Image (tube, rainbow, N blue to C red):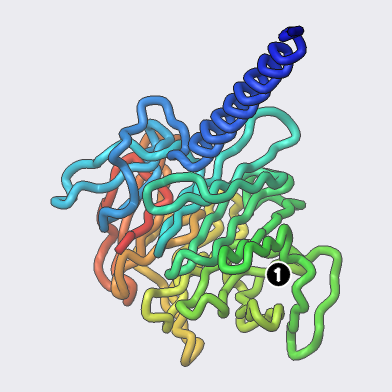
Amino acid sequence: MNVRPRRLRLAFVITAVLLLAGGSLGYVLHARHRAGPLPQAGAEASFDTAQPGLYFRDSATGRVARQSGDGTGRVAGGPSCERFHAAGEHALCLRKLPGTPARTEAVVLDRRLREVRRVTVPGIPTRARVSASGQVLAWTTFAAGDSYAASGFSTRTSILDLRTGYLVKSMEQIPLTLGGARHHSPDVNYWGVSFAGDDNRFYATVSTGGRTHLVEGDLRNWSAKALRENVECPSLSPDGTRVAFKKKVSDDPGDPWRLYVLDLATMTEHALAEPHGVDDQAAWPDDSTVAYALPGADGRASDVWSVPADGTGTPALLVPNGSSPVTVH
């Protein structure tokens, strides 16, 4: 009896099974890698955002850290990010990719800091925000230039809705109402989104015609209307009643802004007690306090400071060598 064909068929079946098993193993390993924490050299496996507290970017290491419970130290081990924000069930990490032209990687993470989604956009990372639920995220990059004070800069702001998976790569085409009329202009730029608690309403800065405006946006209706001039990088208070923002008070390109708070019901504003120029999108650790980053004594690394939101008091050092502060509940 000729058994050679039978042996060949058997060898073929065994080979096919091994190949399929190898392919399945490769897929499992690949899937496990994608579902794992954002890879970081020396990152602590136990570091996540499930622990309530103040999170920030450590200026010395470039990695996300958490202030210890007594406020005297820090817990390290987070991912490397240029900008960081977290709320609800998700966090957002912006990282500048190497090479030219400049590109930014926006990495969405869950509370265990495992990657959920990754988006690459042009420009340099500058602003990051996550809605209170963690379901809607926004980020801004500089498409040209390296400062809001620089002439001719261009921004790109993206919005990602994790409920639907829909990504708005650039919100420049959102219908804008300015001065009661629909506004069309090729120089429109948006930046510094801040979400309300309903995951629909948001605030942002729009620049057009050489002026900046605070806009209130509606995600469902995809529309925006200007509320007030000379407002940059708005940050909505946890109770949704006020906006902390940068106000241009000088033509000095090195120190043009001061921190203010705007009451949205009365549209009245007041200056905060921080006397230095703040080039940052402020954060609210609570309803009565505003936090922000300022350059450190060496002019390179930054520190996180806080000041009362009602305009009283004096600035207090909150986190040395830190930036991108956010309180996670």
Q: Is residue 258 above or below residue 81?
A: below
59 sits to left or right of 120: left
Numbered disc total: 1
The type of residue carrying mark 1 is Arg
- Residue 57: image quadrant is top left
Q: Is residue 81 above or below residue 69?
A: above
Q: Is residue 249 above or below residue 287?
A: above
Is residue 248 at least partly visible in the picture? Answer: no
Q: Residue at x 51, y 66 (%)?
A: 135
Q: Residue at x 46, y 64 (%)?
A: 134
Q: Position of residue 235 (x, y in %)?
A: 47, 69
Q: Residues within 10 Å of mark 1 (few under 14, many from 20)?
A: few
Q: Residue at x 73, y 51 (%)?
A: 153
Q: Position of residue 36 (x, y in %)?
A: 45, 39
Quadrant location of the N terminus? top right
Is residue 4 at least partly visible in the picture? Answer: yes
Q: Position of residue 192 (x, y in %)?
A: 58, 63
The residue that disc 1 covers is 211
241 sits to left or right of 220: left
**Observer-nearest of 224 and 268:** 224
